[in-house]
Image: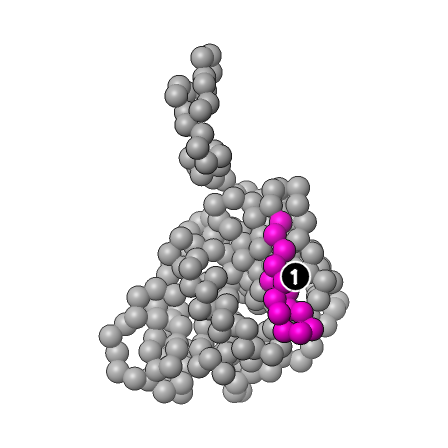
Amino acid sequence: MSAQPQPKPYLTPEEYLALERQAETKSEYWRGETYLMAGASTRHTIIGANTLAELVVQLKGRPCTAHTNDLRVKAARAGLYTYSDVTVVCGKAEFEDRNEDTLLNPTVLIEVLSPSTEAYDRGAKFEFYRTLESLSDYLLISQSKPLIEHFARQPDDRWLLSTYEGLDAVAPIPSIGCELRLAEVYDKVTWPAEETRPQGLRMVKEPGEGYTPR
């Protein structure tokens, strides 16, 4: 979820955190530069809130906690400070300092994909996240259709991809004993007709008598 680099001099991590804690908007930090986080669409916020709600209920009374995108995550080996749409941490949360707003040991990270940041979330950001030894799962949730992609870390440090598509699908997350029902994740989400129509289908006439899909 990052956008355009801001033309600023090199910042130390300490300088970034001091500024970020006073800022009204969120920024990522990577190796001395800050990147303003893009604003989220209504659809994005609904999907994120639904996902968080599902996990909060399922994790109640258990040693894992789900957090909103207000919790900052640090990937120390990558030199990155960022925010994930939903973060789950199991066991004792480790923070960078006494402010307890920068998590060091996330267990599950979830991103809701946006057109402007999808390539980053799939590429460089996932590469940065993979440097986190605590991370067991990375999930990407589509905004354009009911689809969840789940990358699960294997014992040999490979990442196994499983995909779940359609409102009847259920995406299990065995590492935390949870599952995401896509019908719940996408509750109250609507898509314009042009997004839900299969690729290559062209409307010749408006629906009704004489309607011919091509």
Mark 1 Cα within 10 Å, few/some/many (few <14, many 20+)? some
Q: Secondary structure at mark 1?
A: helix
| Residue sitting at x 61%, y 66% | 159
| Residue sitting at x 46%, y 36% | 199
* Spot occupied by residue 100 in the image (x, y as percentages of width and height): 54, 81
* Residue 119 visible here: yes
Q: Specify the quadrant of the image occupied by residue 178.
A: bottom right
Q: Which residues are magenta?
A: 151-164
Per the image, the residue denoted by label 1 is 56
Secondary structure that dominates the magenta span: strand
Q: Specify the quadrant of the image occupied by residue 211.
A: top left
| Residue sitting at x 58%, y 64% | 138
Q: Is residue 27 left or right of residue 155?
A: left
* Residue 184 visible here: no
Q: What amino acid type should be assigned to the residue bearing mark 1? A: Val
| Up/down of 53 relative to 91, above or below | above
| Up/down of 139 relative to 17, above or below | above
Q: Quadrant of the N terminus?
A: bottom left
| Up/down of 9 relative to 2, above or below | below
